[in-house]
Amino acid sequence: MARHDGRKANQLRELKIKRRFTKNAAGSVLIQTGATTVLCTASVESSVPPWLKGSGKGWITAEYNMLPGSTPTRKSRKVDGRTTEIQRLIGRSLRAVADLEALGEQMITVDCDVLDADGGTRTASITGAFIALVDALQTIVLPDPKKFPLVDSVAAVSVGLVNGAGALDLDYIEDVDAAVDMNVVMTGSGKFVEVQGAGEEATFTEEELMKLIQLGKHGVKVLTEAQAKALGKKWLW
Amino acid sequence: MARHDGRKANQLRELKIKRRFTKNAAGSVLIQTGATTVLCTASVESSVPPWLKGSGKGWITAEYNMLPGSTPTRKSRKVDGRTTEIQRLIGRSLRAVADLEALGEQMITVDCDVLDADGGTRTASITGAFIALVDALQTIVLPDPKKFPLVDSVAAVSVGLVNGAGALDLDYIEDVDAAVDMNVVMTGSGKFVEVQGAGEEATFTEEELMKLIQLGKHGVKVLTEAQAKALGKKWLW
Amino acid sequence: MARHDGRKANQLRELKIKRRFTKNAAGSVLIQTGATTVLCTASVESSVPPWLKGSGKGWITAEYNMLPGSTPTRKSRKVDGRTTEIQRLIGRSLRAVADLEALGEQMITVDCDVLDADGGTRTASITGAFIALVDALQTIVLPDPKKFPLVDSVAAVSVGLVNGAGALDLDYIEDVDAAVDMNVVMTGSGKFVEVQGAGEEATFTEEELMKLIQLGKHGVKVLTEAQAKALGKKWLW
Amino acid sequence: MARHDGRKANQLRELKIKRRFTKNAAGSVLIQTGATTVLCTASVESSVPPWLKGSGKGWITAEYNMLPGSTPTRKSRKVDGRTTEIQRLIGRSLRAVADLEALGEQMITVDCDVLDADGGTRTASITGAFIALVDALQTIVLPDPKKFPLVDSVAAVSVGLVNGAGALDLDYIEDVDAAVDMNVVMTGSGKFVEVQGAGEEATFTEEELMKLIQLGKHGVKVLTEAQAKALGKKWLW
Amino acid sequence: MARHDGRKANQLRELKIKRRFTKNAAGSVLIQTGATTVLCTASVESSVPPWLKGSGKGWITAEYNMLPGSTPTRKSRKVDGRTTEIQRLIGRSLRAVADLEALGEQMITVDCDVLDADGGTRTASITGAFIALVDALQTIVLPDPKKFPLVDSVAAVSVGLVNGAGALDLDYIEDVDAAVDMNVVMTGSGKFVEVQGAGEEATFTEEELMKLIQLGKHGVKVLTEAQAKALGKKWLW
Amino acid sequence: MARHDGRKANQLRELKIKRRFTKNAAGSVLIQTGATTVLCTASVESSVPPWLKGSGKGWITAEYNMLPGSTPTRKSRKVDGRTTEIQRLIGRSLRAVADLEALGEQMITVDCDVLDADGGTRTASITGAFIALVDALQTIVLPDPKKFPLVDSVAAVSVGLVNGAGALDLDYIEDVDAAVDMNVVMTGSGKFVEVQGAGEEATFTEEELMKLIQLGKHGVKVLTEAQAKALGKKWLW
């Protein structure tokens, strides 16, 4: 069945990645997938959360936010449950590929601020946040310069069942129509980090679940290549 | 590899379900799985959220809370990100098997208060909340008495990779040890509602993902039987 | 004048006390008086509030909360003025029989969560909290093992003027009807801890005040015996 | 035993009442008892709380607040549990002598802002609030001009056990020393509105309780005369 | 053009300054300009904000608040944007004439609580706060007793364009009518501290701007003389 | 005296204005002055604040926010007093050139989110917000299409005394050094909207005040030309 914008079932939207978009943050990446635009900035702090003090380990966390003007109807600045859920997902995804001991006792916060929202903001945030994180890590002093605090890359994509058919990288129109929505977070080496599939007041069969997982795998593979291209070859794990 | 409490890999903890535990709420279920105890109460309100007014449709939502004394170290009453994430999951799971038009313009809130926490509180909440919901629905006037607002049952279980092996219904000790933690929410008829699998600062292979999904399927099947037993046979979909 | 449930003026509702209702908290008591059910858990922390640091003295405090499902109409989780007033009363009542120096620099928080509300929740909380406190104190290391941090027992009951007559241990129906409502908190040895009597948009005479105080004295005496029975004889002061 | 400021056991501190202290509020009373100074202003609103809409009844409520500069050590502006407890007491005390139907559907809020605190701020607030309320009621249109919305006067005083002896109208030094602290709220006609007696980490006997009640009765009688003098004789009930 | 209360364009309202209005605060000034009444209290704390710890420097800050009864229609106690804006202005104004090193590591908070509001509350707050600050500084121990922590006096006044004409010290009626509203904060020695001029949904010409600045200069000069009179001559810089 | 970046005293930083930077908001402008970057989006709502309902008038308001990554040290997302002060200034500035009756009963919110901060963020916000507002107004239906809801343009610039000399459009380094900091908001036709000058723990003379006003006038004139160039000539008032 045809998608409303003419894409194939397993085709991503047009992807643009712009590193060093702003100057003050240690890492700053503007990532655009179709009409979704997210600014990911990574900031370094020399102190860690209380429970890590004296442990020799660092911490990586994330905050996610949609700017009021990012949606056709203005979005209030109030933090809601969806926001906290998403920023916890981004933080976990980044830490899954990190070596927090190699980071030493410093904290990196990656802020993902959505400037324009057209579906897939949380997965674009993860894909862009990883690049901002790499850039920030290159500006800091590490305990052991030979031990980089990342052991793999990470990227994410949404997949879903739209009108009964699997579709990769849903935009807002498809997202609203989708009976099932799944986010797949994977590493550059092909391991899974998170799989979150949910029926929207609907359910799905095991067969459909398997199909969506395969679509997600494919999407992350293409995104990983784009990350490596943006960062330069040596950042390919 | 043996589990610390002697269970088999695919064995649930001892399950107890007590209906009508308290008197004031329309539905009230005390569910215990091992040392995890959750009180699920379902309350009915005659008004719906603003966006449903005049639609003829009802709403089902959930709140989740851990009592301060439910953990060995006292838990503060402050609501955190984890709490909002869990109550959103419970609400979505209940709505996935509901026919909100058959409910008419009334709202049911299921409160899941954890009295004792030993792992698996969110999945026990879903399994117990469904029963409290059934009980509450039997106390109210429906638009069409022949059209019950539930079209299927729903239950949930946690699975995980502990010391490299799959394990069903993790208790707290296993949960801390688990490299991967997954919650599987399914209907009595064997459809998936949600699958949430996450590495704890770790990743997992596609093979491991498949194994966990199978373990979860098995667990939900046993839980569905227990729900039907507690409610009486006619509640088997 | 007859009471609606057939009780005599000076008769308590049926009382049930269940110790160790949950496993994680150091003290855990389920207390039921008629259709009012409160779970009292006592948790121990090794640090005290800032103003006691270095004093050698401990602290005992309480939190009170009604679960949303504890009332026929669902109660929102928001903390209101009534809640803070009640938890301050419970804390003061427990400290009135405590020897905070004998406790040493540790803090005990007793959480009183109302599972089912049918009047008298604050007084049932005090009566149950005392037992949970005793249980928790038996699990901890004291500065001087021969000096137990409690010097008396404490229990509480509500009394009121219903249709012009004094009545002990009001249930919800009587509470709504009562022109005057009084809470009497006393020790096992017959001393007063708190007396709080208030007209509900009404006033009362000195004679009525005296009558209510006597009814309260009687009620606490019976409750003290029930506490001693639950705890074992050696806990009778 | 002598009191530190030379007063007799049953003697109030010097009392000053200044009506119309500020111009904007409908009622405005500066009340001083010793070094305690409270500004009580009564404001009228033409709408009532939601639960009274359409009932034909009005509402009287109170807010209590200590200015940061009212204590020797600056008090933060944050609202604490003590504050909400006190403002609920003031509101109940005023409503106990009010005829809310005679008020019609309008709301009066009495704000008690403590400018200088030296003990007894909540009881001085009640005594002053009543006068501000009378003044505000004279500025408004009533449903039936012949039916004034107050049926009695109300005043309050603190009493306590200081060094084993009863004492009336405690100042801050005595309040800190007192083993038992009691607030007595009564009407001009000698009825009780509230009696709140509490041991400060101490207990009290029935005999002591009776003595404190008598001291309170005496104090309120003197305060009632002062209120009538400030308002003019016709305000004596 | 005549002003509604008969004042000349460059005439202040009647000014009353009462020092030591309350007893507990180190400095306490009741300032009245026309029907505007503000209580300014200055409290001393021995600790400074974190960023000054160990610096040897002190800090002076302010809080501003309107009591609910200060306006004809009761004002809610909620803090709004206007409040924070005003208290930042008062704090900056006081610090502009302070020598924070001469103060040593202590903090003074000046609380400006508006008891009656008839326009010009923020400027009356600054003028009164300065006097309360002087009084508080005389009660404390300074690092070098010969070096007083104030190097000049500060006072403030509002000016505005009302019906096209300049007017000094606007009351509420004029404030509502004014097309342009300006606050001028100056020192006793004739230096500017802050100039804040804003059109109320209107604009103003350079000529009008200059005229308002001259009116403000004149007003502050008269206020400075009143401050010196209240404090005694030696406080004239 | 030379400026650290080689600019003349009356020279602005390099200015870039990019309209339609994002797609969802009705107006969207990325404004850059030197290393300061602000995204201004204007959103339209069909309802107005309660106090304007039924008045036939519209409303224009603004929100200001610095993204966490906009500063070298990460800025927390908490709203502080400075933020509310700035967004009130932006809102007033836009309304000063608006004809709210010509807008009809609709509300426009301009969100100014600072992506990169190097001084002058509030003045850049005003200059950019005006352009976003013009763009948004062209997308909506007006009561009278011939009556555009703007009667003039508005722009703003900061000026200051740095090392004793006046300087236009301060960057962060100069801002920190400045003894006096002033924001000048003016219309395209040369009228003043706001003048806010403040000594940073310092004072300034009348002569210095006059000099800064002249510098500000010059700066706004250049900015007005840039706005007209971005919008097209017909937008020159």
Image (spheres, coloured by chain):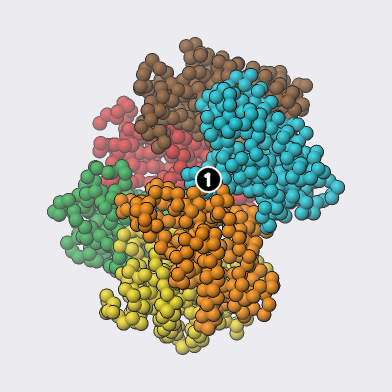
Chain colours: A yellow, B orange, C cyan, D brown, E red, F green
Instruction: Pick whichever, D33 or B177, lies toward us.
Output: B177
Q: Residue at x 69, y 73 (%)?
A: B6
Residue B38 quadrant: bottom right
Residue with the most extreme front position: B233
Residue with the most extreme top position: D233
Q: Residue at x 49, y 36 (%)?
A: E113
Q: Residue at x 51, y 74 (%)?
A: B217
Does dot 1 land on a helix, a strand or a loop?
Answer: loop
In the picture shown, does residue B214 fall above or below F135?
below
Instruction: Pick whichever, D64 or B162, lies toward us.
Output: B162
Residue D93 rendering spot, x and y as whole percentages: 53, 27
In the rendered image, the quadrant that contains the N terminus of chain E is top left
Q: How many marks?
A: 1
In the picture shown, does residue E42 fall above or below D189?
below
Circle 1 packing at 10 Å, graded few (<14), some (14-19), many (20+), is many
Residue C126 rendering spot, x and y as whole percentages: 67, 41
Residue C197 rendering spot, x and y as whole percentages: 61, 28
Residue with the most extreme left position: F146
For label 1, the residue is B24
Residue E71 rendering spot, x and y as whole percentages: 41, 33
Q: Is residue F62 left or right of residue C155?
A: left
Residue with the most extreme bottom position: A233
Q: Amino acid at mark 1?
A: Asn
Q: Is residue C100 left or right of residue E86?
A: right
Q: Is residue F9 visible?
A: no
Q: Is residue C6 visible?
A: yes
Instruction: Pick whichever, D146 or A140, lies toward us.
Output: D146
**In which chain is the residue bearing label 1?**
B
Instruction: Pick whichever, A149 or A22, lies toward us.
Output: A149
Q: Residue at x 13, y 54 (%)?
A: F146
